[in-house]
């Protein structure tokens, strides 16, 4: 396949307004010229937009865009002459053209209101929407979507097709209840499509799963149509991993054998902190399963929801390098309005893509150096946390951030692959954060993994439920973890008591008790954040308790702000909060609370210490480490005899991300704006870093250098490490350690 042996540098150019303000100025020739300018080797454009207009000749399905000078067929021919591949976007479920012809084909909520992709104010009545969602259960799938993707690829000669915003999801707010959905569900299950989602109701469970099946059946049918037109076409799905409650991630997990790759749209990154691009890149790679399948990740050339405005240069540079460092392919997205109004970002991405072009040989065929892998379980996300997925995502995200800030090599793996990932050689450490739902075969794989020398970290209600919704009434592997499960305490606040006598040396310099739980940011009916302060009743059997559970003196605190603050600590319970154990050749650490979610939410170093101190004492030696501030993001790879390390510098100006803290009964007007999102404007160079590589990874005499700058780095061997002195990192440094010629 054409994408296998090259590093993709993608430019996405969108013409996305109903009137085509600039469409008459955009030609095939101008887009090829733009792609060459930015050193892109892949160009993505619409074959058909959300209003149902095409940008190519000869369609028998849709009208030609009335104001467009672009012919995608011509674009493909011109691009191919320059070695540039073209991917077209089609089958967007938003389609005003189909809706005006057949309003009954639209997705509709339980009240009969049309579901839309556009953003209406909550209280606004939807009338004649621009982007109504069309239902894949309607005749539109046969009459438009399937023939559309075949036609788009065949008539343009495109090298790939991206299902952009193909949306049909199970959440109550987004679920479709149109006549076609009702009829097809009843035909398949013999029961009425339930009017609400309640996982205690069997019909609701059927409906939830069925909506994913609808998605997968449509995606598979469209794949076959695309491959009929061009067997070599790259078939992609827009998963939008940090949006839509993460439902697109579950589609990817289930469609992994249908898709050739994934576009991980990352528009939320501008309102998240550093590291989000790495997390969604690695999560998408894990869910897709095959490391040879490309994951394209967007760094918008505009800022947040301002597509006409270029962000400061460092925002783009950092974003692109973070994607590359995490193992993805960067996809720079620009809209026509920005290109003609404020194209400054084009020059910025051109400078980064030119650097990527120069070091392409080091990027193609590289393999990540593995040490710690965080498990992501699609069933836990979608069955146990179906109405509150943020509690599970927070647990996964928190561990990822801890490892990133600690400069430890980390990956994400899906439980779908646990049979091959539960290997101590491949993954010396596995972390299962609040992984509530696990099948019996995964339990046995993990048991063998630990016995053979693996190190398992688990938290909270680990494996207490099976995929069929039945309870084990126990934590899986609790005999290995060294305690008995006695249910869960639903506290709002609690404490992790560290003054444990013989284990106190683990916690030198930390307080006697570390609080868990927090006040609610919704603050509507509950003062505390539901689930955050929960603690499993873990009664020690064979494990070594490193900390105990300690109660708070009240349900919430009275000091400082009545009802939002943390209560004072009270009695210590005879229940383990942290337990360490050995089994066979392996080790385990168990946390009775959601440790990752606390770090994700609050970022306090105490939570990271609770993981890292016992982990690094008992786990195998890390293959690669970095001595430097946690604001430098390290990712390490191996290619043949070379070690390739990316250092991405997130040491920046005081970026502001501010959000509301939640109302209370008599809230006065706010003092300053509740919502403030400031971009990265300035990168502060970091000096005097030391990269440490286990000498076992190296063979013979080596040199360390930066192929982008040409700088040679001083090295020394000490205590089993090759230590590489990196004098300075500005935006990014690439360190290659390879045999000396």
Image (cartoon, helix red, strand yellow):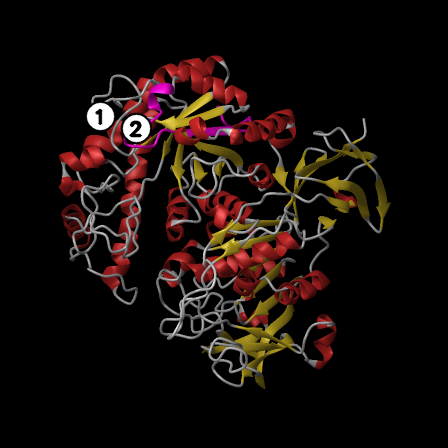
Q: Is the magenta stretch mostly helix, strand or loop?
A: loop
Decide: is 483 above or below 364: below
- The span picked out in magenta is 2-25
Residue in the image at 40% along x and 63% along y: 466
Location of residue 668 by image quarter: bottom left
Element assignment for label 1 = loop
Res 129 seen here: yes
Q: Label 2 neighbourhood size at 10 Å, few (<14), some (14-19), many (20+)?
A: many
Q: Position of residue 126 (x, y in %)?
A: 20, 48
C-alpha separation, residue under disc 1 versus residue under disc 2? 8 Å
Cβ atoms at labels 1 and 2 below 8 Å apart:
yes
Q: Name the residue under label 2.
A: 48
Residue 62, numbered circle: 1
Decide: is 4 above or below 440: above
Q: Label 1 neighbourhood size at 10 Å, few (<14), some (14-19), many (20+)?
A: some
Element assignment for label 2 = loop
Queried whether the magenta region covers residue 17, the answer comes back as: yes
**Quadrant in the picture for the C terminus:** top right
Residue in the image at 45% along x and 17% along y: 79
Q: Where is residue 241 in the image (x, y as percent from the top left)?
A: 43, 47
Residue in the image at 19% along x and 60% along y: 195
Q: In this view, does 124 lie to the left or right of 536?
A: left
Q: Where is residue 15 in the image (x, y as percent from the top left)?
A: 36, 29
- First of labels 1, 2 by sequence position: 2
Q: In this view, does 723 lie to the left or right of 313?
A: right
Res 439 seen here: no
Q: Is residue 198 left or right of residue 443?
A: left
Decide: is 52 above or below 444: above
Queried whether the magenta region covers residue 409, the answer comes back as: no
Q: Position of residue 709 (x, y in %)?
A: 73, 30
Give the number of marks. Answer: 2
């Amino acid at each position: 396949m054409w994408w296998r042996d090259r590093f993709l540098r993608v430019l996405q150019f969108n013409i996305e307004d109903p009137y085509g303000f600039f469409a008459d100025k955009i030609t095939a020739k101008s887009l090829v010229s733009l792609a060459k300018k930015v050193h892109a080797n892949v160009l993505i454009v619409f074959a058909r937009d959300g209003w149902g207009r095409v940008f190519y000749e000869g369609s028998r399905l849709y009208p030609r865009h009335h104001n467009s000078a672009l012919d995608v067929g011509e674009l493909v021919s011109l691009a191919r002459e320059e070695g540039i591949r073209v991917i077209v976007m089609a089958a967007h479920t938003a389609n005003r053209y189909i809706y005006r012809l057949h309003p009954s084909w639209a997705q509709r909520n339980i009240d009969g209101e049309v579901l839309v992709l556009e953003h209406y104010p909550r209280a606004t009545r939807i009338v004649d929407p621009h982007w109504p969602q069309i239902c894949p259960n309607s005749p539109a799938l046969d009459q438009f979507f399937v023939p559309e993707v075949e036609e788009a690829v065949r008539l343009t000669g495109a090298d790939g097709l991206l299902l952009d915003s193909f949306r049909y999801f199970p959440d109550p707010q987004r679920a479709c209840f149109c006549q076609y959905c009702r009829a097809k569900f009843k035909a398949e299950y013999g029961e009425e499509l339930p009017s609400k989602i309640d996982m205690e109701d069997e019909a609701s469970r059927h409906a939830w799963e069925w909506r994913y099946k609808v998605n997968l059946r449509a995606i598979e049918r469209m794949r076959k149509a695309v491959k009929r037109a061009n067997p070599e076409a790259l078939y992609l799905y827009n998963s939008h991993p940090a949006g839509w409650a993460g439902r697109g991630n579950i589609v990817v997990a289930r469609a992994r054998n249908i898709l050739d790759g994934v576009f991980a749209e990352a528009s939320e990154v501008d309102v998240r902190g550093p590291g989000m691009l790495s997390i969604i890149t690695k999560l998408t790679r894990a869910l897709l399963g095959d490391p040879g399948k490309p994951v394209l990740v967007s760094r918008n050339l505009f800022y947040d929801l301002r597509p006409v405005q270029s962000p400061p240069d460092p925002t783009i540079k950092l974003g692109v390098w973070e994607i590359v460092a995490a193992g993805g392919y960067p996809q720079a997205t620009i809209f026509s309005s920005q290109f003609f109004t404020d194209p400054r970002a084009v020059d910025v991405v051109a400078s980064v893509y030119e650097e990527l072009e120069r070091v392409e040989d080091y990027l193609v065929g590289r393999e990540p150096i593995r040490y710690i892998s965080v498990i992501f379980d699609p069933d836990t996300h979608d069955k146990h946390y179906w109405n509150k997925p943020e509690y599970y995502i927070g647990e996964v995200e928190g561990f990822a951030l801890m490892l990133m800030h600690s400069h430890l090599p980390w990956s994400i793996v899906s439980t779908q692959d646990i049979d091959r990932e539960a290997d101590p050689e491949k993954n010396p450490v596995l972390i299962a954060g609040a992984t509530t739902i696990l099948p019996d075969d995964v339990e046995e794989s993990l048991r063998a993994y630990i016995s053979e020398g693996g190190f398992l970290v688990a938290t909270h209600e680990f494996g207490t439920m099976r995929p069929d919704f039945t309870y084990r009434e126990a934590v899986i592997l609790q005999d290995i973890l060294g305690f008995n499960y006695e249910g869960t305490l639903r506290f709002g606040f609690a404490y992790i008591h560290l003054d444990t006598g013989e284990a106190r040396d683990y916690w030198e310099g930390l307080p006697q008790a570390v609080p868990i739980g927090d006040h609610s940011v919704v603050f509507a009916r509950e003062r505390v954040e539901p689930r955050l302060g929960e603690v499993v009743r873990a009664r020690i059997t064979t494990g070594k308790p490193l900390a105990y559970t300690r109660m708070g003196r009240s349900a919430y605190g009275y000091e400082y702000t009545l009802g939002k603050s943390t209560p004072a600590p009270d009695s210590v319970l005879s229940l383990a909060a942290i337990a360490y154990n050995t089994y066979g050749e392996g080790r385990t650490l168990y946390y009775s609370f959601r440790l990752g979610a606390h770090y994700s939410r609050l970022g306090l170093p105490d939570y990271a210490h609770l993981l890292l101190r016992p982990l690094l004492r008992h786990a195998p030696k890390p293959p690669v480490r970095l001595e430097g501030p946690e604001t430098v993001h390290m990712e390490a790879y191996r290619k043949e005899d070379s070690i390739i390390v990316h250092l991405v510098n997130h040491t920046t100006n005081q970026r502001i991300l501010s959000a509301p803290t939640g109302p209370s009964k008599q809230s006065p007007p706010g003092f300053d704006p509740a919502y403030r999102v400031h971009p990265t404007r300035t990168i502060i160079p970091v000096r005097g870093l030391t990269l440490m590589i286990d000498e076992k990874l190296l063979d013979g005499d080596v040199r360390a250098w930066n192929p982008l700058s040409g700088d040679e780095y001083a090295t020394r061997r000490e205590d089993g490490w090759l230590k590489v002195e990196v004098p300075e990192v500005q935006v990014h440094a690439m360190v290659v350690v390879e045999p000396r010629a």
